[in-house]
Amino acid sequence: MEQISETHFTLTKVGYYLLHDPMTRINMDYNHDVCYQGMFYLGEAIKSGKPSGLKVFGEQWETLYQALPHLSQQVKESPE
């Protein structure tokens, strides 16, 4: 949002898409549920060359695809 006076705001293009575009909402939900916590391990993943962020889902997996059956219901259903 962009403030145009002390009492009025206008919605920017980004804000409009965040509120009204289904694909944008799905991508945001997916990133929140699946990617966000794993990004805390990005530096470690770059140094080791391994997907270090997958440990947020439990044991260390080689790929996200191996972890899929073991993910929480919230992650499995994201985005719906």
Image (tube, helix red, strand yellow):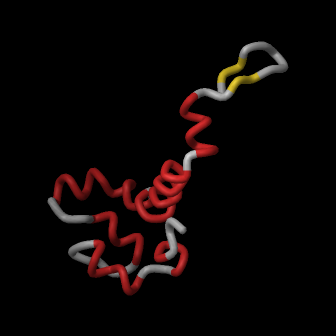
Q: Between residue 66 and residue 43, name the one nearer to us.
A: 66
Residue shown at the point (56%, 29%) measured from the top left: 13
Above or below: residue 5 compared with residue 62: above
- Residue lying furthest bottom: 69
Q: Between residue 25 and residue 5, name the one nearer to us.
A: 25
Above or below: residue 13 compared with residue 8: below
Residue shown at the point (55%, 52%) measured from the top left: 22
- Residue 5, x across and y down, in percent: 78, 13
Above or below: residue 13 compared with residue 4: below
- Residue lying furthest right: 7
Residue shown at the point (47%, 76%) measured from the top left: 76
Q: Between residue 28 and residue 71, name the one nearer to us.
A: 28
Instruction: Determine the image quadrant of residue 65.
Output: bottom left
Instruction: Determine the image quadrant of residue 44.
Output: bottom left
Task: Report the side of 48 relative to 72 (left or right).
Answer: left
- Residue 6, x across and y down, in percent: 81, 16
Above or below: residue 66 compared with residue 4: below
Tally of numbered discs: 0
Task: Report the side of 32 relative to 45 (left or right).
Answer: right
Residue shown at the point (54%, 33%) measured from the top left: 14
